[in-house]
Amino acid sequence: RELKLLEQGSKTLVLVRPEIECDPRWVVYADEARQSWERMSKESSSGSASSSIGSFFLSSNNDNQTTTPDLRYGKDADIIKADSAELAVREKVFLLVNRILNDKMSLPGYIYRHLILKHKRIIMFDENASDQSLSDGEDAIDSSRICRTNAHNIIKHVTATLLEVRPGLSSSSVMTELSADAVELLVFGELYSDIYEEFVQQTKEQDTNLSNKVRDLCDHVKDSGVESGVESSTISQSAIAALRALPQVHTPAEKLSHCVGFLESISEHFSTLYQGKCIDADTLLVMVCQHVVASNVDHLHAEVAFLEEFSRDEQLLSGKEGYALITLQASLHYLESLEEFFNVLGPIR
């Protein structure tokens, strides 16, 4: 589907993203987890419902009734009441979400663990085959997308349950966004290696072709003394570091942050080298391509495919993130169209 990032007159910047469809089977899995939690709650010897601390992170009636009130909400209070100089709002939200999802007796935590384990069983024991009847005659799930489909559904149901139980976390668009980021961080912490391997297999041919072209470029210029076929003065080491950091982080927000840093470092480097000159889109594209080649990141197409799949519209429409991603996409598309790099990616004069 198309996501419009910028419209200026007749020019429109468009990011093409896959249409994400939710698997109805995960609705069943989430309902099973909720029913199991409700039975467990009724059977427990819990006391009366605990009172909430303030109204900002107010708990609904669906939240855990079995934990000692003082202990449970005392931990919340420590996080909420921390001074802003000590803990930023983003860190407060993450710590609170992390505590809730790791509470074995809370509804969000119970559903979170139930769905994560369901994913692991599907991957290890191919449980999708036995559950096929739940799809009501619809086409089977694409086996090459099982992990990412599972991730989309887990994130959706865990986030929805979390906001149901802690309505304060959805008190504003910013709070909702921070809560979703926290859920993603925890879910990808469990599923990332499975998900990423799908993208590596999907983009294997593209990444192999890019690596081969980079190797041919290096072979072409190895006797000239010019590293990677690009003058070192045209390369920003901070941009290289930002791009090489992509494989080290596992969430869309973190990866997009490095993409922004990559593009900003290139822009700052150009401004330092060519003071007083304006940079147009074609020049920027060539510079980005030079840095992509110089960085030689493994599975860069897989990294971009991951961002295309999991970056939320709210992240991409915020400005820098969407522009950085679409510029990186354009550079890879341009490099893919080239037969060889030597004559095209020479130093910018």
Image: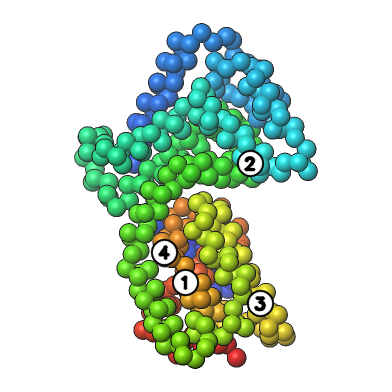
- In percent of width and height, residue 348 lies at 57, 87
Of marks 2 and 4, the one in the foreground: 4
Label 2 to label 4, Cα distance in Å? 33 Å
Q: Are marks 2 and 4 in contact (CB under 8 Å)?
A: no
Upstream in sequence: badge 2 or badge 3: 2
Label 2 to label 1, Cα distance in Å? 37 Å
Label 1 to label 3, Cα distance in Å? 19 Å
Label 2 to label 3, Cα distance in Å? 35 Å
Q: Which residue is mark 1?
A: 296
Label 3 to label 4, Cα distance in Å? 25 Å
Upstream in sequence: badge 3 or badge 4: 3
Asked if residue 200 lies left or right of residue 275, the reply is left
Callout 1 secondary element:
loop
Q: Which residue is mark 2?
A: 175
Residue at (59% x, 10% y) in the render: 48
Identify which residue, 94 or 56, lies in the foreground.
94
Q: Are marks 4 and 1 in contact (CB under 8 Å)?
A: no
